[in-house]
Image: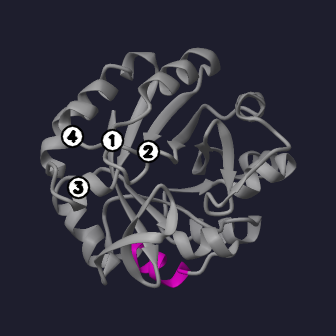
Amino acid sequence: MLIIPAIDIIGGNVVRLFQGKFNQKTSYSKDPVKTAKHWARQGAKLIHVVDLDGAISGEAKNIGLIKKIAAQLDVPIEVGGGIRSLAVIDELLDSKIMRLILGTKAIEDPEFLKKAFSKFKNRVIVSADVNAGKLAIKGWQVSYKRCDLGAFLKNIAAIGMKELIFTDTSKDGTLKGPNIKMLKNMLKTTGLKIISSGGVSSLEDIYRLKMLEKNGLSGVIIGKALYEGKFSLKEALKFS
């Protein structure tokens, strides 16, 4: 199970949001490159980077900064936020980024997702962000009503994707534990590998997620708990 530290970027700063609410943010660093290097030194095998400015605007805003992170690390990174065209995918994958995370565009435009996966294969991955059982898009600010979660997951599997990122947005940034029940159900019904994101607060939470590895849980993205010092990345990596 991969243990993946998260770096969320707003205005060039490393931040964490509470339940994805942009008016409830905490800043932890003014230097995302330095932060990424810190996680690399601590032993990260993959780092999760999100351009929150891009997620809310619909257009990648921190491409230069993200390319700088990728260029200065030996550890691979995955990147999401505002990636809504094949041209942007092309540009970013040319800059040492391991894979790109698709959210809003993948949900709103199934043909785009099909084309992206056909062209880039496993260098793109979908993030299914869920709020109160509904898919959340546009930086989690809008509930998508034209397609439910079950239908979307079936579409992902149908085009040949094997893995996705799942976030219960009500848990994200709360330090109240991941949604184990929903994860178990998704693993059972979809046959997809899942990377869990949101809610991790303790090493006990990571242990509980580790128990789902046999069911297909392939990784866990951790943000606020690391930045708040609830445990160290080195401690978390013992569960990998």
Which residue is tagged 4? 202
Which residue is tagged 2? 171
Q: Which kind of residue does numbered mark 1 sit on? A: Lys
Determine the CA span between mark 4 and mark 2.
Answer: 14 Å
**Percent of width and height locating residue 9:** 44, 73
Determine the CA span between mark 4 and mark 3.
Answer: 9 Å
Q: Quadrant of the N terminus?
A: top left
Quadrant position of residue 179: top left
| Of callouts 4 and 2, the N-terminal one | 2
Asked if disc 1 and disc 3 are in contact, CB closer than 8 Å, the reply is: no
Indicate which label's residue lies in the foreground, 1 or 3.
Answer: 1
Which residue is tagged 3? 226
Indicate which label's residue lies in the foreground, 4 or 2.
Answer: 2
Residue 100 to residue 175: above or below? below
Q: Which kind of residue does numbered mark 3 sit on? A: Leu
| Of callouts 1 and 3, the N-terminal one | 1
Determine the CA span between mark 2 and mark 1.
Answer: 7 Å
Q: Nearer the viewer, residue 146 or 238?
A: 146
Asked if disc 2 and disc 1 are in contact, CB closer than 8 Å, the reply is: yes
Crowding near pointer 1: few (<14 within 10 Å), some, many (20+)? some
Residue sitting at x 83%, y 46%? 110
Q: Is residue 207 magenta?
A: no
> Overall secondary structure of the magenta stretch?
helix
In the rendered view, does 62 fall on the left or right side of 230? right
**Percent of width and height locating residue 117:** 72, 46
Give, as a single range, the part of the protein colored magenta. Answer: 62-70
| Of callouts 2 and 1, the N-terminal one | 2
Determine the CA span between mark 4 and mark 1.
Answer: 9 Å
Which residue is tagged 1? 176
**Percent of width and height locating residue 123:** 58, 51
**Percent of width and height locating residue 225:** 25, 52
